[in-house]
Image (cartoon, helix red, strand yellow):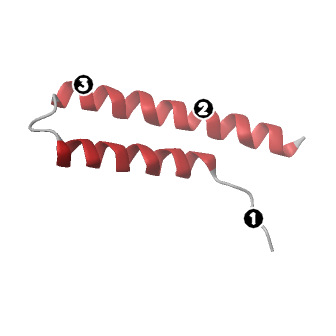
């Protein structure tokens, strides 16, 4: 049985993995920049999730 990809969860997970890797490998990343990337990244993931759900219902 196949299930549909949850794009919001996939993209949000990849974003958090990327931020985690950045904090592990960089000496001290700028907290404000990382917060902005997080907010805009989650917004982008939400937008893609909404678009995918709309296209899927057609």
Q: Which mark is residue 43?
A: none
Q: Quadrant of residue 47?
A: top right
Q: In screen coordinates, is 10 left or right of 40?
A: right
Residue picked out by circle 3: 33
Closer to us: 26 or 43: 26
Is 58 placed left or right of 8 in the picture?
right
Compared to residue 33, the image places residue 1 above or below, namely below
* SS for dot 1: loop
Secondary element at image label 3:
helix
Residue named by callout 1: 3
Give percent across and percent down for residue 7. Answer: 62, 47
Q: Residue at x 81, y 38 (%)?
A: 55
Disc 1 and disc 3 in contact, CB within 8 angstroms: no
Q: Residue 31 vs residue 38: left or right?
A: left
Tell whether 45 sits left or right of 50: left
Vertical placement of residue 14 versus 29, above or below: below
For the point 78% across and 38% down, the residue is: 54
| Quarter containing the N terminus | bottom right
Q: Which residue is mark 2?
A: 47
Q: Nearer the viewer, residue 43 or 28?
A: 28
Most extreme residue toward the left, as rendered? 27
Secondary structure state at the residue bearing disc 2: helix
Point out residue 40 in the picture as x, y percentages from the top left corner.
42, 27
Q: Earlier in the sequence, mark 1 or mark 2?
A: 1
x 31%, y 26%: residue: 36
């Amino acid at each position: 049985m196949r299930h549909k990809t949850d794009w919001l969860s996939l993209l949000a997970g990849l974003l958090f993995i990327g931020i985690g890797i950045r904090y592990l490998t960089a000496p001290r990343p700028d907290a404000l920049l990382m917060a902005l990337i997080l907010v805009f990244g989650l917004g982008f993931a939400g937008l893609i999730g909404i678009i995918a759900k709309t296209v899927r219902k057609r």
